Image (cartoon, grey):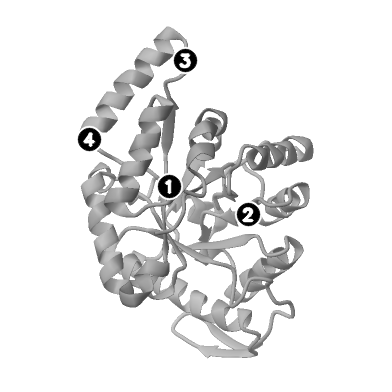
């Protein structure tokens, strides 16, 4: 089983001083990685922001959780990823997804194709990028990409390529992840407007996803790192009485429902939740929203590397 590690997810602040200070603080607190989303919202653009974070730190891994395959050519994405990996001395995690937020597509003027089409296109994109990372000159003729003589001209430090993260939870995505991914990030399946499907966010639903992945991955399964995208963290310790009451009620409800995507309670209770989820689900990589970075840090420091 993999050792525990923890990442911070952030979209800002949108100044050089604030952004780099936050990256350094995440590293100082013992977090493994700084991750960004890839949406057309009020946030820094991921690739240049992560490059700045890499310059400001020395150990912190960097990545996008996750890049929407439809927003970029796989050739350009492979080149940008390889460049970022080279300049960060091998600290990139390459997250890729098929896209789901309809508002992004509207703003970009890009057709919001059916899920099958978006996933098919992502599969082709992954195949192209892996060949480019291997140093090939790529000709590719698929249903969605037709490429001639593509090369990226720079190789990533991490070989054969930066760890590939696939996020999702549907049966087909689990089959693809079992075949292609180094890290699988479980997220509650979302509606097109970005709301989680509650029935898919329970512990039992996540356990079913893990089993689908295990079946698809076969002998690869033990080498895949399992990750949980934590939507919300509420740490009880040190809260004012009213806030503490709210966190206590939230912890009770979370305990009754059971979801690895919400962590609530005292630090010791949250630590025990994380330990139980590793026992039940095998999840060892946890991504935490930046607003909980300070409160959650003692848990990360206690468990990281164990």
Numbered mark located on residue 257 in the image: 4
Residue pointed to by mark 3: 239
- Between marks 1 and 4, how big is the CA–CA gap? 17 Å
Residue at x-position 65% and y-position 50%: 60
**Residue 252 in view here:** yes
Going from N to C along the chain, the mark reached first, 4 or 3, is: 3
Looking at the rendered structure, the secondary structure element under dot 4 is helix
Tags 1 and 4 touching, CB below 8 Å: no
Residue pointed to by mark 2: 61
Residue at x-position 78% and y-position 36%: 17
Vertical comparison of 86 with 11: above or below: below
Q: Nearer the viewer, residue 282 or 172?
A: 282
Q: Residues within 10 Å of mark 2 (few under 14, many from 20)?
A: many
Q: Give the left or right position of residue 233, taking residue 26 as reference.
A: left
Q: Give the left or right position of residue 163, taking residue 260 as reference.
A: right
Q: Nearer the viewer, residue 232 or 48?
A: 232
Q: Residues within 10 Å of mark 1 (few under 14, many from 20)?
A: many
Looking at the rendered structure, the secondary structure element under dot 1 is strand
Estimate the x, y position of residue 205 in percent, counting from the top left: 23, 51
**Residue 260 in view here:** no
Estimate the x, y position of residue 246 in percent, counting from the top left: 36, 17
Going from N to C along the chain, the mark reached first, 4 or 2, is: 2
- Between marks 2 and 3, how big is the CA–CA gap? 31 Å
Residue pointed to by mark 1: 229
Tags 1 and 3 touching, CB below 8 Å: no
Vertical comparison of 92 with 161: above or below: above
């Amino acid at each position: 089983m993999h050792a525990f590690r923890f990442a911070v997810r952030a979209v800002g602040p949108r100044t050089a001083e604030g952004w780099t200070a936050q990256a350094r603080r995440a590293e100082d607190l013992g977090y493994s990685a700084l991750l960004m989303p890839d949406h057309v919202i009020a946030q820094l653009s991921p690739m240049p922001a992560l490059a700045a974070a890499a310059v400001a730190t020395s150990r912190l891994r960097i990545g996008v959780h996750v890049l929407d395959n439809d927003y970029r050519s796989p050739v350009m994405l492979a080149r940008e990823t390889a460049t970022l990996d080279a300049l960060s001395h091998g600290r990139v995690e390459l997250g890729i997804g098929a896209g789901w937020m309809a508002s992004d597509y509207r703003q970009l003027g890009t057709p919001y194709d059916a899920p099958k089409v978006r996933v098919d296109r992502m599969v082709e994109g992954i195949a192209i990028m892996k060949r480019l990372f291997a140093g090939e000159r790529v000709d590719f003729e698929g249903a969605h990409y037709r490429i001639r003589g593509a090369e990226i001209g720079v190789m990533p430090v991490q070989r054969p390529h930066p760890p590939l993260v696939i996020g999702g939870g549907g049966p087909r995505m689990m089959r693809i992840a079992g075949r292609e991914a180094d890290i699988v990030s479980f997220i509650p399946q979302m509606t097109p407007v970005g709301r989680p499907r509650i029935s898919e966010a329970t512990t039992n639903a996540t356990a079913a996803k893990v089993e689908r992945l295990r079946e698809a991955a076969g002998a690869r399964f033990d080498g895949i790192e399992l990750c949980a995208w934590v939507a919300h963290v509420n740490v009880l310790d040190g809260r004012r009485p009213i806030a503490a009451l709210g966190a206590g009620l939230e912890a009770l409800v979370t305990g009754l429902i059971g979801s690895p995507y919400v962590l609530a309670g005292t630090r010791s209770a949250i630590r025990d939740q994380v330990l139980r989820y590793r026992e039940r689900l095998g999840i060892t990589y946890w991504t935490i929203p930046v607003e909980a970075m300070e409160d959650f840090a003692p848990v990360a420091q206690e468990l990281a590397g164990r």
